[in-house]
Image (tube, coloured by chain):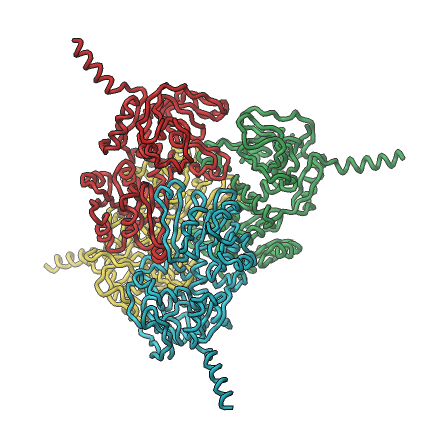
Chain colours: A red, B cyan, C yellow, D green
Amino acid sequence: MKAARLFEYNQPLKLVEVPEPKITAPSDVLVRIAGAGVCRTDLHLIEAVWRDALGNPKLPYTIGHENAGFVEEVGSGVTHLKKGDPVIVHPLVTCGVCRACRAGDDMHCVSSSFPGLDGTDGGYAELLKTGARSVIKLASGTDPASLAPYADAGLTAYHAVKKIAPATYPGSTAVVVGVGGLGHFAVQLLRVMTTAKVVALDSRKEKLEFARSLGADEAFQTGQDGGVKAVMDYTGGQGADVIIDFVGEHGTPAAALKMLRRHGTYSIVGYGGSVEPTTLEMISRELAIIGNLVGTYNDLAELMELNHQGKVRIAADRFPLDDVVDVMHHLEEGKVEGRAVLVPAMPSAKKAEKEVARAAASG
Amino acid sequence: MKAARLFEYNQPLKLVEVPEPKITAPSDVLVRIAGAGVCRTDLHLIEAVWRDALGNPKLPYTIGHENAGFVEEVGSGVTHLKKGDPVIVHPLVTCGVCRACRAGDDMHCVSSSFPGLDGTDGGYAELLKTGARSVIKLASGTDPASLAPYADAGLTAYHAVKKIAPATYPGSTAVVVGVGGLGHFAVQLLRVMTTAKVVALDSRKEKLEFARSLGADEAFQTGQDGGVKAVMDYTGGQGADVIIDFVGEHGTPAAALKMLRRHGTYSIVGYGGSVEPTTLEMISRELAIIGNLVGTYNDLAELMELNHQGKVRIAADRFPLDDVVDVMHHLEEGKVEGRAVLVPAMPSAKKAEKEVARAAASG
Amino acid sequence: MKAARLFEYNQPLKLVEVPEPKITAPSDVLVRIAGAGVCRTDLHLIEAVWRDALGNPKLPYTIGHENAGFVEEVGSGVTHLKKGDPVIVHPLVTCGVCRACRAGDDMHCVSSSFPGLDGTDGGYAELLKTGARSVIKLASGTDPASLAPYADAGLTAYHAVKKIAPATYPGSTAVVVGVGGLGHFAVQLLRVMTTAKVVALDSRKEKLEFARSLGADEAFQTGQDGGVKAVMDYTGGQGADVIIDFVGEHGTPAAALKMLRRHGTYSIVGYGGSVEPTTLEMISRELAIIGNLVGTYNDLAELMELNHQGKVRIAADRFPLDDVVDVMHHLEEGKVEGRAVLVPAMPSAKKAEKEVARAAASG
Amino acid sequence: MKAARLFEYNQPLKLVEVPEPKITAPSDVLVRIAGAGVCRTDLHLIEAVWRDALGNPKLPYTIGHENAGFVEEVGSGVTHLKKGDPVIVHPLVTCGVCRACRAGDDMHCVSSSFPGLDGTDGGYAELLKTGARSVIKLASGTDPASLAPYADAGLTAYHAVKKIAPATYPGSTAVVVGVGGLGHFAVQLLRVMTTAKVVALDSRKEKLEFARSLGADEAFQTGQDGGVKAVMDYTGGQGADVIIDFVGEHGTPAAALKMLRRHGTYSIVGYGGSVEPTTLEMISRELAIIGNLVGTYNDLAELMELNHQGKVRIAADRFPLDDVVDVMHHLEEGKVEGRAVLVPAMPSAKKAEKEVARAAASG
């Protein structure tokens, strides 16, 4: 089968032929990929940003950690799934017996793998091997391809919003920093899952109206001060009760601490920079700073329910897996609107063009 | 009456005569100070560390924010206290009507004052003016002087332990960084309020046995690495579930992040330095960093109950208020064991010595 | 001033002239009533249902516990309110110093009074005496009269929904039993404050469409079985995760236990009957049964914010206080749509009729 | 192998020879029983008390749901256990993929079995078949036999205490009703896991000193009023904050509601009777009544840790499995002190006696 693999850091992925994965354990599941979401983390993987945090994984491997498709084959111990079931795939493969798994904190499993990230083969391919504990069956008849971005982007935003929701109340203010693929989704989730007033911040003016159309009570363009003055004015000088930062670099952490209310929570999703409060600042205003990893299996199931009820949506465009290098290039250049999904079964647009050209020439 | 006041930053306090405070509002209460605890924060106030965080308070003012004594007089609206009641004083004077006060988060009252810190006169004096909402009546017959350190040092440690308690469970590990005035108390509280294994860290070897005697399951001397290796070994390479840092400078924040388990909580009480994680570190291990201010009124009432039941204790020595400058000097030089309490009614040891000397000379 | 008072159980209230209340304590506040909500509890008070639970209050007294109006006068200790401020009044007068008050659980204050219920004079009058801690200032320019039902009916529904909200999640089912004054409001609150699917039950067919129009995902008419089959079918045989019962008699408790999911919560607001599970039933399905009293001050402030944002509304009709006996009679006969509010300043419709009649006769 | 089975309700178990269970699924585990705890629920099973709640299980089956022993054999999908590992067995066999399992609420698994209760063969036998998700490995060298009662009696008490712990605080009062097999353990757990004052109630005078020796702050003998007066006096007329009832019949529910504080929680573990509050009582005092089923897998792991640390202990006596009928008879007659554990490998005391007798006769 074909797969897009990382052979060398800071080089484009290569689309190559690889053997199909095989069922080896009773809990294994093979999923025929209908769509694999393209995530900014995929760019960072290529740039080696994650190398150390992931324990320096062996190259090459197939990337892609936002996967949806159809069950192809199941191991002997899997009784609740059968070939042809439409499914979305939780990004981690977890053991099911450690304390974290038993508590539902799948993403803190002590012997998990993370296909597409840690050297285990991911979903930029025709088939993905995962575990039965990672597979969520979708309603019969569902087209899974466009749901792929929920598996990580959607799930991470959901997890972050769910964690801070108890800190909100009618009259409180929740700020979303960055109205991109995750941020535009968080705006919707905050409306559905909390009673807070939602304020969106973005450096790009065109994102402000977009945020308002998704339910933000207010949206401000960040200038020199990262939006601090706008948020302080909006909150009557008190600051925001919670801030979810989908940027995490270029000064957003410092600005967030300045616009945070006493006893407020600064919640981090985006990464790249650092956050550097003094310990005096942390205690004198009793602040909390929390990181967010992807969510749990139940989080993903809940999110699929919200999507099914029509309460939230992620805008996603489909591209042929064959064009993966171009798609990632476009993402890097900021040319992708919403989320991009790679579809193995879709013919390459470039090939198509070439064939047209050839036909014309031979005509 | 006499009072020890801050006239100039980086200069010793001056013991001077000032007018007695007067009841002006119906909720006012005057407390005759039996003891006022001496806190490291008092040194920091003199060093101007807090000046900006406190909005540059006007000098001079009387410091002292750990106060206990007897009710002297109450305003016309106070019906639950009467002259002579032994009391301990919550450090803030709060409004009682803002959302924070109504929710019990007294220390986040939007129109509070903090006697002894923010320019309002504190308890290094014969009388303290506070509000009825800040006064906890003690059991009849109680000697309040030795309880003064509970009003801030004890309360802050209690609040910090109570906040992290839900993150602990049998088999989890809680690390206390710094076995000083607050840390030695936190060790006791962790034993009483959680089921975690308690590990104490200190750079001073003599503090290790002290920590164990108070109930620590283990105690390690911090060397070059701030105790990271010892804690990682103790926890089988997983790291501590929670860390409460009573130092907050000299490298403790960086070491804490290194010895913290995935999904762990680093809780800050001590201050002076800064904590500087990358946003990638925060999200890839899903860490939480939380600051702690002093606790609530109910926290203090609960703490008095634990003390009353004999479950926790703070070692305190009494000194004459007249000797305040010497006592603070000793604290700065690390010569104070446990907590020091200033007692207005106690004759100066120095005067006593001087009188003895004079008597001898005239003899 | 005029006031409607309970002189004898099971007899109509009498509208009489009484002296105006006076400020006697520094924290007292007099409110000029703009509107006082008429509650089913007022009927039950007259019927002596509450007599024992309230400690057999001394008659006569003025009833009315859903009050809104304008500040008329404040005690010497009240600094955050002034004459003319539009306000809504929390139903209890609380001490502010007990543990419950300090924790924000105002309704469990150990030395509270409950004007209009426990023998303390309530708001079916021109002026109400309450405490500063019970008064919520509304935005300048607000007309408080129509907001009166929020002070108890709205607040109780809000408190009940807020308590069960943590037990809901996307895909869970919340059942509202009884689409009356509180139930129709709870349907709205469940939509705004949770992600559960909302199912309304009522014995009256005409209430079903009303519930759907307010946001219920489904509404069923209860027949012989109290709606058990409909809810079990709707939930695929699992039962509802949470049930809030605004009836509490005529078989609703027994039906609720039958349609409750394993580990589900049955939340009681309406009263009159009893709930009688076996202890085996409680443990084998691990059920929870919880009662709800009115909410906290902060709950009421949050509710006013939701109303201000236009997210929830209570339908209320105004009637002259002079016609109190007729209005209560109509409520008893089920002729009041939504909530009735008594307005002291409104001329009696009956008097008006009489005057017209007289004028005609003398013409 | 030999097994003690229920052939007919209200008749003694029969000890018979049955085929050994076989591994059939990849997640199956066979445990060689070292000890099986005898529980009052086993008596109730025979008395058909549970028949309907369990869906009328098919007879005969082997009872015994408190099991500990050594791994005998594992299915092909089990990698974390091997033959000879000492283990304790969580009482349910759970699916691992439903929402409840994923959230850690094992006992609410939607497709679980409950060996020894629901018709699935339990542990009054030489071998028990369970699932890998139900097996907790104990420290190497542990003798599992005496730990068997932790698997259900201990676990249920732990779960109940853990659930109510957040409602306690220093100065609050927790009442334990019934100082039997579970109650005497709950007293210890309340001491270790909460800061509440612990009050034990029992109708048997000899249990009072026993409760005090385990850490109860006070113990009262229940008379006519079920201990109501004693608890009300102890709590200054306020009532207990939480009550855990290990009896659940013979009037304990009615007494519990009378001695419960406003906003208090009545937690039920024992069963047999019913609890019958009026809805007015539930709301006017805002009470909560909660049932408790056995705990989660993580609960059991935590409990094993507390036992390992020496903080709690259950007194258990061993008896030969061969003598099961006699042992159950003794339990019924109240002649068993602490918990009884059946040991398959232990020779029958009666046989031994008989052999002695025979030997003597033939001598």
Q: Is residue C150 left or right of residue D66?
A: left
Residue B48 drawn at (x, y percent): 33, 65
- Give the answer, above or below, for where B317 lies relative to B193: below
The percent coordinates of residue B253 (x first, y second) are 41, 51
Q: Residue furthest right?
A: D363
Quarter of the rendering occupied by the N terminus of chain D:
top right
Which residue of the protein is positioned furthest toward the top in this rendering? A363
Residue B324 placed where, x, y %? 42, 73
**Above or below C38: residue B316:** below
Nearer to the camera, A267 or C270: A267
Side (left or right) of D20 relative to C273:
right
User: Residue farthest to the bottom?
Assistant: B363
Q: Nearer the viewer, residue B29 or C111?
A: B29
Give left or right: position of C149 versus D237. left
Location of residue B349 in the rendering, given as x and y in whole percent from the top left corner: 48, 78
Residue positioned 69% across, 31% down in the render: D15
Quadrant position of residue C227? top left
Q: Is residue C333 visible?
A: no
